[in-house]
Image: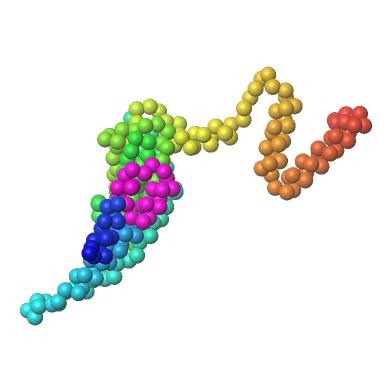
Amino acid sequence: MASALEELQKDQEEVKALLEKSTRKRIRDALTSEKSKIEIEIKNKIQQKSQKKPQVDNEKPAAVVAPITTEYAVKISNYGWDQSGKFVKIYITLTGVHQVPTENVQVHFTGRSFDLLVKNLNGKCYSMIVNSLLKPISVEGSSRKVKTDAVLCRKKAENAWDYLTQVEKECEEKEKPSYDTEADPSEGLMNVLKKIYEDGDDDMKRTINKAWVESREKQAKGDPEF
């Protein structure tokens, strides 16, 4: 029968395999968090196992090992990006990240996504997952560089980018007003008022309702609105 440590190691390999195949942001977030928990459990099991080893009389007492600080995943949401030449660059600020071991800063690129995982930075695990990049990137030509209090992720891209992700582009396009020269001007005004009404608070809705009623009453009496 497999030991608890062996079972945890098998779980770890399974989560790694799922992470490599997963492309959905929500699923990758959950898997990244679970992977960090399993890694912590494995460290604790190994520590407990080493402490149970019997001491030989002529051996020096083992040094006291400080308890492992429990890590938890912190989602990185603030970042900056730009494009120069053939590279799209993402700047993530993390105080003290240059002081952790190089292997603790991991970046995984795919054709249309990337994820960053920083482990054991002041007892915490930081993760950032970006899916649906605006355009395909070259995985082989992409890289990461750790600087003072920052991580730079460089993604090789041939074409110019106006947005980082497809989602940002779609949101921006939805916000842009549509102009139709052949449309009825009054219909366009009604669409604007309708959007203001739907997005407004209760006071705004009461104001629009009052103005609408007064306008209809004036029209019914034959009075001009102005």
Viewer-proximal residue, 6 or 93? Answer: 6
Residue shown at 41%/40% (left/top)?
A: 131
**In x, y percent, where is residue 90?**
38, 41
Viewer-proximal residue, 202 or 147? Answer: 202
**In x, y percent, where is residue 16?**
30, 50
| Color encoding of the figure | rainbow
Among all residues in the image, which is located at the extreme top? Answer: 182
Q: Is residue 212 magenta?
A: no
Q: In this view, does 6 lie to the left or right of 75?
A: left
Among all residues in the image, which is located at the extreme right? Answer: 221
Residue shown at 38%/42% (left/top)?
A: 23
Q: Does the magenta stretch include residue 26?
A: yes
Quarter containing the C terminus: top right
Q: Name the magenta segment's main secondary structure.
A: helix
Write down the quadrant of residue 12 in the picture. bottom left
Residue shown at 26%/35% (left/top)?
A: 140
Among all residues in the image, which is located at the extreme left? Answer: 58
Write down the quadrant of residue 139 in the picture. top left
Among all residues in the image, which is located at the extreme front? Answer: 1
**In x, y percent, where is residue 29?**
40, 50
Q: Can residue 79 be seen at all in this image of the molecule?
A: no
Quarter containing the N terminus: bottom left
**In x, y percent, where is residue 25?**
42, 45
Q: In this view, does 167 lie to the left or right of 118?
A: right
Residue shown at 37%/32% (left/top)?
A: 136
Q: Can residue 191 be seen at all in this image of the molecule?
A: yes
Write down the quadrant of residue 218 in the picture. top right
Q: In this view, does 62 lie to the left or right of 100?
A: left
- Please state the extent of the stretch shown in magenta in the rendering: 15-35
